[in-house]
Image (tube, rainbow, N blue to C red):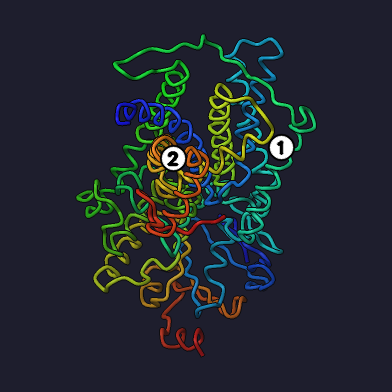
Amino acid sequence: MLAVLPQLIVSGIATGMLYALIALSVTVGYRATTVVNFGHGDLVMAGAYATFVFVGSGLPFAPALILALASLFLFGVLTQRVFMQPIINGPHLSLAMMALAIGYAVRGGARLEWGSEVVILGRPYDQGAFMVGSVVLTMDDLVISGFVVALLLTLAIVFHITPIGRLIQAVFQSQRGAALVGLNVHAFHGMMWGAGAALGAAGGVLLGLLVPLSPDLGVYTLIRGFAAMTLGGFGSPFGAVVGGIVLGMMEKLLGFYVSTVFIDITAYLVTILVLLIRPSGLFGQRATVRI
Amino acid sequence: MATPDDILVARGVEAGYGKKQILFGVDFAVAKSEVVALLGANGSGKSTALNTISGFVRPLAGSIQFEGAEIAGKPPHQIFRRGVIQVSQARDLFMDMSVEDNLRLGAWVRGGQVADLLDGVFQSFPRLAERRQQVVRLMSGGEQQMVAIGRALMGNPKILLLDEPSGGLAPIFVNEIAAIIKALKKTGIAMMIIEQNIKLALSVADRFLILREGRVSQHHDVRSGAVNEEEIVRSIYL
């Protein structure tokens, strides 16, 4: 039984990387605007479909991916400006309902085009596997982990070293303060909402390498993203990443050692237990959450 | 009432929050290098007036012109770009950043020679120079107020809007802040200042207005002669 442990951990980390990216993408929008985007899962789905469409139009995978991320960025900026900003000071429930409605509209759009049929995005590389000691590493594991690690490193550099990162931190710490130093906070919110959508879309594309696309793809991802955020500490970018990786490993370990049922329900259990036992998660601070 | 020297002119400004109107047709002007104090009891509309100038509150009616351009109802970042810079009552600092980072962010939008601006602020506030790497959260209220004023100065303001700069500070800091405002006045920067400490306000102001229930009830030129402090307190609160 123990012989498979290293394999489970490695596979768990690879899956967890995907969750980490999705949790981080929700966190980016949340940190900037203090609003949780309940429609985010559908943007994850839209990113995968957008790549599928661009690849279908004859573009190679990399440009199709970049174009899809740019489209989702723009979509995020626009939806924030047009639908969220006008009601930003309204009741929390209105914001949650608006985000949800936008998500459902996106899902509806996908259903209109593809119905409930699944489509295959297809890998831009050969599917292979390598043995490292007793552990099997698939190309999928390597591509997903490599992509997410590169993205996280880039974000860490932007966040901690560049002046843009300082500005982002400034808005996180005091929106009014940022406005007092002349920053256009509304435009900033739009940009961050867009950045969250683009990161989520990247997660959707990576997921699309593993599973067939369906308009309901977002539901699967959002639950895991939220669970990872809750586990890591709501609002903490570092927590989102760690939470995602830990959740990925827990799914594999519980799924193998206890019951395969746990692959599907670990995210829910983690959310419930963390909220009951340690609501601030591993790295979070108690904060006011606007849903 | 307005003179050619006036850089900020407000006429008939009405403003409020939601359905609650706070200002009812307020007029005032600030000339180049002039310091105008806005006095009044709590709830008289002082902060609302300042926030309406800086764009945080949208006026319901009236006009606010800065250097001849209409700024009423414009968003805060556009008003800031013109050099109208506010130090808010809550200070709104970036609490988990260092003093220097807070100051540098103050120069982000209006640009300029950041190193020179930083030197200027550190000369005005030697206390901040000593603590430039300190996280703002760990500083006293008086020091934080200095960071807030310093951050506003980094934007190279044409007019500084100070909302209760001595509010909640220990007496030693009140004196220090008063000295800073006087020194700033000597540099020729125009200021509009809200202050509960009447003595402080009168020691720096060229003119003052008293707001009462959202209207300007009195108008005095401090330069024209002796001002009876007791009488002012009475007209504010009674």
Q: What is the x, y in percent for residue A179? A: 51, 50
Identify which residue is drawn at 31% across, 18% down. Answer: A134
Q: What is the x, y in percent for residue B59? A: 66, 62
Identify which residue is drawn at 67% across, 68% down. Answer: B18
Q: What is the x, y in percent for residue A183? A: 51, 44
Q: Nearer the viewer, residue A60 or B12?
A: A60
Q: Which residue is mark 2?
A: B108
Q: Residue furthest front?
A: A1
Q: Nearer the viewer, residue A21 or B68?
A: A21
Tell me the amino acid under the disc marked 1.
Val
Q: Nearer the viewer, residue A15 or A55?
A: A15
Report if residue B106 is visible in the image.
Answer: no
Closer to us: mark 1 or mark 2? Answer: 1
Q: Nearer the viewer, residue A233 or A195?
A: A233
B77 vs B134, left or right, is right
Q: CA distance from mark 1 to mark 2?
A: 37 Å
B105 vs B218, left or right, is left
Q: What is the x, y in percent for residue B19? A: 69, 71
Q: Secondary structure at mark 2?
A: loop
